[in-house]
Every structure is written in C-alpha cells, then in structure tokens.
Image: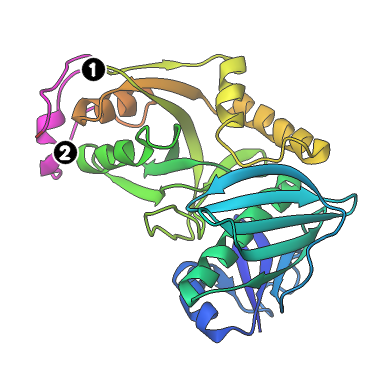
Amino acid sequence: MAKHCVVAGLHFVIDTDDKELLDVLAQRYAIFSRSASAIAGVPVLFTLSQTERFEPLADAHVMSEFECEGAWCVYSETDTQVQISLLDEKTREPQAQMQSDNHFREARCWLSGEVWQREYCYNNFLMMLFAFASMDQQTLLFHASVIERNGKAYLFLAKSGTGKSTHSTLWLTHVPGCQLVNDDNPAVGIRNGEVIVYGTPWSGKTPCYRDIQFPVGGFVQITRDATNHIQRDGVVPSFAALLTSCSGVKWDKRLYRAQGDTISTIVGKVPVYTLGCTPYREAAVVCAQGVGAWNGESDGDFEKNSQSMKPSGVKLPEER
C-alpha cells in the first residue's frame, strides 16, 4: 500500500502493507500526505518499501557506526548500494535493515519486533533517506529547534543536551507572538533564491509535526555561559557551525560537495550568530533582540512576558 508524502516540497513514497504500522506512522505523516493524483507531476525523491527479511550485502564495507536515539546504527556500502542496519544498543542484535541504491532513490527494508519498534526503525530509515536524497535538491536536514516570529524563523543549533529546546521554550514563554515550527529536525532548502525552513515529520521527543514553512531570519549557535551575550559570526565560523549541525555523509564525495555548496549559499544569504547564555528568561530577550526578531516591547497582551522586560545585559535572578 503506497502512501505519498511531501516534505519541503519534495515527494517521497511510503510502501508497506503493515496496516498496524501505517496507523502509528499516521501520527507523524498524515499531515504531509497527499493523494497520488494531486502530485502526479511531482518527481519522486525516493521510495521505501517494506519487504520480507533479506540477506545482508556480502561485500559491503562498514563506513560508519553511531548511536541513533537508543539503537546502534551501522552504515555500510558497496560500489552501487548502501546498507543501513539498526541494532539493539546493548545486545547488537539486528532489529531492522535497509538497502538502497547509492543515490537513495529506491530502498527496501525489513523490520522486526512490536509495532512501536517497527515504527521507530521505519521512521528512522525515512529520515535518513530524506536527509541523504535531498542534498542534491539544495535541501538539508538540520539538528535544530525552530521558532517563528513575525513571519521569520530562527534556528537554534547546539550539541545534544546543551539546550536547544530549553531556549525555544524561553522564547515561547517570554517573547510575544512566537510559535514552535520544529524541535529537532527541520528541513532547510533554497527555493527561488530564498532560504526557507520547513516543518517535518521528525521532531525528536517533541511531537511537533507541522506542514508549515517560513523564510529563515537567522541561525543561532547556543553555548552555555554565566551571562547572556550574542554576536554575529564571520563567514568561516558560520560555515563550520552549519556544517556540524546538519545530517551528512562525509565519505560520499558527491553528497559532501552538494552539502557544502548549499551551506555556502545559505551563509551568503542568512546571518549566523553565537549566543552565550543562561537557561533563564534574559537569554531569550538578548537573543530575540540580537537577531532583530523583537524590540523588547509588548503591546500588553502578553502577560507572561512582563518580568522579562529588561534591557539587554541585565542579568535576571535565577528561576526556581
């Protein structure tokens, strides 16, 4: 049973007869689904078909191994194919496996376990396929939390555990007129010369699956500090910040070049900042003012914000 989805303007196909799996996937993907007739003229970026268990590639070389949200992922490839295996993080027993052509257009996978385990693996395969296949389309999947205000979106970048989601929450609480676009894996694409961020079916632990898009007003790399301060970065540190914050395949020269070209274009169009911050209210105020998203004033309709009406540089007391 084929289901058609569009994310960031890119069309992919979910192909499985597992109705139980489809019901669970619908929580994420239903808002991105389209009828086949409605997008008949839109090229298919990739198709992921669920099949019976198949043999692993005999001559595949392991290119990378890494932790993947509670599972262990092994990325292998031959001259013409890619294989991604998801293993139990503790036992290293195979839970699921995907094989694809090396352009990530046609892929198949087998899944095992309860429906929540099958959904976890299939969803991660879809996310990886999208990240890799879309690089040729000037589209990158970022590890970021995204807030929109006044028609522009701001992406917060940081290492896991640093506080991307915490900072977004500060904006939602203390900066009027904000909304959360995505909390972990938004897509950023260059469309008609403009840098656009898109909601996706992948949002980490926050179920924020929204089919919305906004021009990007800026990227903010978050670092923890005792005080709050923000500065705009130069071209080289901006490039480095974005490169380390988006999904990529460094050993694939074709994709790595496409990724770098897209990042170079983004850096030429959108500012990148570094924010040193605390996990408290003033951090959002300093950041919002620093990126030009807010002048620090309220029209009186945002009562939560009353305590954060402080000029930049004033350190607020710790919240309990």
Instruction: Inspect the magenta stretch and tell me whether residue 311 lies in it.
Output: yes
Taking the magenta stretch, the answer to whether it contains residue 190 is no
Image colouring: rainbow
**Quadrant holding the N terminus:** bottom right
Q: Residue at x 30, y 22 (%)?
A: 277
Nearer the observer, 306 or 27: 27
Magenta stretch: give its range. 295-319
Within 10 Å of the Cα at label 1, are there few (<14), some (14-19), or many (20+) other Cα atoms?
some
Q: Residue at x 30, y 30 (%)?
A: 294
Image quadrant in which the C terminus is located? top left
Q: Give the answer, above or below, for where 280 lies relative to 235.
A: below
The type of residue carrying mark 2 is Asp
Residue 235 in the image: state x and y as whole percent.
60, 17
| Quarter-of-image position of residue 47 | bottom right
In this rendering, the answer to whether 139 lies above or below 5 is above
Q: Nearer the viewer, mark 1 or mark 2?
A: 1
Q: Is residue 169 visible?
A: yes
Relative height, residue 260 to residue 93 (above, below): above
- Residue at the location (21% across, 25% down)? 282
Left or right: 81 in relation to 197: right
Q: Which residue was labeled with disc 2?
A: 299
Label drawn at residue 312 = 1
* Secondary structure, magenta segment, majority class: loop
How many numbered badges does the structure rendering display? 2
Q: CA distance from mark 1 to mark 2?
A: 19 Å
What amino acid is labelled 1 in the image?
A: Ser
Q: Which corner quadrant of the image does residue 291 belong to?
A: top left
Q: Is residue 257 left or right of residue 142?
A: right
Q: Secondary structure at mark 1?
A: loop
